[in-house]
Amino acid sequence: MYFRSILRALGVILLILGLTLLVPALYAWAIHSPDLEAFLRSAVYTIGTGGLLLLIPKSQYSLRTRDGFALVSFGWLAAGVVGGLPYLLADVVPSFTDAFFESVSGFTTTGASIFTVIEDKPLPVLLWRSMTQWFGGMGIIVLALAIVPYMDIGGMSIFQAEVPGPTADKLTPKVEDTAKVLWIVYVIMTLALMVSLWAAGMTVFDAINHAFTTMATGGFSTKNASILFYRSPLIEWIVILFMALAGMNFALHYHFLFGRFKPKTYLKDSEAMFYLAMILFSVASITGLILWKEDRIFSETFRAVTFTVTSIITTTGYATDDYELWPIFSHLMLLLLMVMGGCAGSTAGGVKSVRIMLVLKYVYVEMVKLLHPNLVRDVKMHDTVVERSVLSSILSFLFLYLTVLVVSILLVSFEAPDILTAISSVVTSLGNVGPGLGTVGPTENFAHLGDFTKWVLSINMVLGRLEILTLLVLFLPQTWLK
Amino acid sequence: MKIVIAGAGEVGYNLIERLSKEPVQLFVVDTNPVVLKRLQDQFGVTTDLSNVVDSRFLSRSHLKDADLFLAITNSDETNMIACKIASAAGVGKTVCRIRTVHLEGAKKAESLQSLGIDHIINPVELVADELFKGVMTPNLIESHAFDEGRLFLYGYRIQTYCQFFNQTVEEVKGQLEPYGILPALLLRQGRCFLPKLAQRLEEHDVLYFLCPLQKHTTLREIMGYARAAAKKKRVMINGGGHIGFRLAKRLEETHHQVKVIERDAFRSQNIAGRLSKALVLHFDGTELKSLKSEGLTDTDFFLSVTSSEQINLTACLLAKVNSHARAICLVMQQEWLPIVEEGTLIDRAVSPRILTARHLSRFIRGDRVEASFSVAHTEVLQIHLNANCPLLGKTLAELDLGDASAVGLVAREGQYHSPRPNFKLQNQDLVLLLVHRLDRAKVLELFGRAF
């Protein structure tokens, strides 16, 4: 471990975070909010710490893969703490645990909240809450790579550690440029959404906040009733569209936006197609079931189900309907979608569609091999062979995901009121979704859970966002040996 | 005509052997003195011991007035550079043998032009194409282009389910006349002759048609072969080399059920990655047990295309004995062809070298005829009449070609005319002659071509 290099890089990240804290501070100053002081103090603490870390003399070593893992993990934990500072200082949360939970839930784009009432919170706090999601969506390290020149933490492995999916797409020869390009696409899409929401009838403040949390597939809202508050089908459809887009690989959006707008970009990507097929299948089956069992209007049910399914599979977590009132089948479908999540390279969580798709293909190939013992066949995607090493890492990731899930459920069950809450709160945290079932359903929040549970869930969110291995690898003794 | 050949390998040797009988001037360039010596002794060609991509080669004068340059060494890159050099030196036409590099798609013509290549010849592609045709149109024994690819000679085997089976030649002729198709030659028990009108067609006969390219489907429909070809076929290919891979690729693209057997683990892995629907199986293609467990008995076609003809022969014989499949065998040595086709159960043998040499000979125009193709002892010759031809203005009835020879078709202004006795020959007519080998000299003399 090259601690000096890691700490210096961490200093840069803290500096960036501190500067972003100035945005809500500026807003607080503009609307003459009393919370200006809280934000200014948070910013000064953060920038101060970052500055101190940067005073450490420069090391001659640049970061290696293992240092990258440490940097990413510590970076995210630091972000959790920094993000919680304004909540504590503005006195909107009762304890550090709650502040950390809310902050981590923000940065990991989970969207699980401990706020029972949202509307009475100061506006700068709400803005900061949305901003944490927006920065966490594309990634803090990716942001640092994109805006800080010569950070000397280059290399694909660090990028890989933060961008979700089995393999990260390198869009340009230099990682720094790739990070830049991804952020540009992200900003363009966020702006487009902002304008659309504003045009559809939201206030400027709400449009900005919802654009941030939708593109990040986060799910924080400025209203208790979330998107339902606006009672506008148009807004709902806009949000559905952008949630679905945010759940797709941003590399595809890049090729689409910068490659003459060819629809083929999406149609030829098997992961995107698999993901859309999953959405369509879930919407069709759940809508059909509801209409069959209950007497409801088709258009409203269809919209509500499409919204919920898209919100859950992209791990956004907005709700326009209490899905706990739907048939049991849909509860389980939604739980499965929470585990699956969106596409690799997106802002969505979960195990990612591509992994599920490749494992299904792998199982199919193994079955064909039973019929033809001499058969030579590899799993293929986009007409190229998926290497064995990628497949085995996917399989071990899936196993690890299940292990973390089971262990966390056991831990949460110490304090949980019922089984459904225990299971769904872990699934929703590890998948970075937000709402669960039982006492953490779409109409409830996480405030009533015990402190221990909140810590377990916070760690689960970070594990889910960094896809487990990045964080878990730090617990291997070999990582720390010279 | 002056021809420069770069590369005296297997293909080169075959080609030189063929060309040495034609009145052309041959220059052979190679780096192997032993091979060149042998060529000099055997065929009396002029040879040049040098490297084609050498500047010394450039400075010599062969290239300046050459009409045709054939780059057929074993190296793609050498061939490409050689063509570039040759075209820069002002050669009439360049032909490049390319095996691995794929110059395809929209930029093909452009990239060829920039390399100074007029024609590409890809032996693997040729063989795969021939085998593919063997599967798609199993009754089409051979086909040969005339009139710059607008007219073809198709040899079809007559099966019992063919519409022409047991019909007389006259009946067949009557059905095909409106389409400008002519039943030209009949091959029966190894002997080829001009079909007599009263003759009935029997099973295993091969009937050769002169047929315009656009009318080929019509011909197949009338024969009743079109429907059989449209059926999805089960094909087993032994050998996943270049040829086996190309063939499998084409078959899977046309939605046939393909199994490729490859005994090399690494190679099978490689082609499995590049094929999508075809099943790649890793075992020795002469292992009967594995072949049977993979459904040898139900397969429609069995092709063995490994680089060893011993293996191909064994595998094909195994397939023939244990299934009703049509077996096609790849044979390297030319001498083996008749043995495999006539002495065994195997339905067909294909030789890459013969295919390549035959294809290359398309580019060569001897002084006597523009194109020719021979079936047993009968040759099909294409002659373009010019103003010096003594037969202009004469009717076909006035021609005395002997019993074993005849005029096949006459092409005039894009139209094909079946020979009628009162048809008059004109300047610029393209005449296709069916000539017995023994009458060749006599007939050519009649048309005013010096032998």
Image (cartoon, coloured by chain):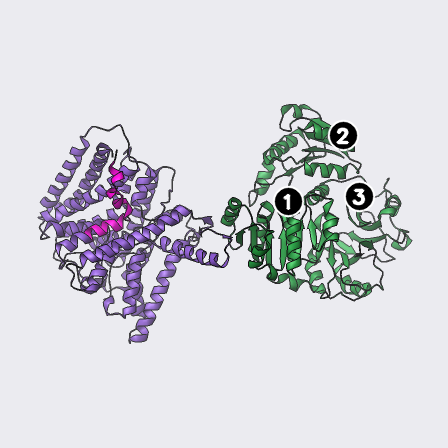
User: Magenta segment: does it hold A256?
Assistant: no
> Between marks 3 and 2, how big is the CA–CA gap?
26 Å
Using the image, name the chain to which the residue with label 2 belongs.
B
State the predominant SS element of the stretch in magenta: helix
Q: Which mark is residue A151?
A: none
> Is disc 3 surrounded by few (<14), some (14 to 19) or many (20+) residues within 10 Å?
few
According to the picture, the residue beneath numbered tag 2 turns out to be B40
Q: Amino acid at mark 2?
A: Gln
Q: Residue at x 51, y 57 (%)?
A: A372
Asked whether the residues under the numbered discs 2 and 1 touch, taking CB atoms below 8 Å apart as contact, a structural biologist would say no
Residue B340 visible in the picture: yes
The hue of chain B in the figure is green
Q: Nearer the viewer, mark 3 or mark 2?
A: 2
According to the picture, the residue beneath numbered tag 3 turns out to be B369
Which of the two labelled residues, at mark 3 and mark 1, occupies the earlier sequence position?
1
> Between marks 2 and 1, how big is the CA–CA gap?
30 Å
According to the picture, the residue beneath numbered tag 1 turns out to be B308
Q: Which chain is rendered purple in the image?
A: A
The number of discs equals: 3
Picture quarter containing residue A75?
top left
Q: Is residue A368 left or right of residue A213?
A: right
Residue A396: image x %, image y %?
33, 50
Residue A226 visible in the picture: no
The region drawn magenta spans A457-482
Q: Residue at x 60, y 39 (%)?
A: B112
The verdict on a common chain for dots 3 and 2 is: yes
Label 2's element? helix
Q: Amino acid at mark 3?
A: Val
Q: Is residue A371 left or right of residue A190?
A: right
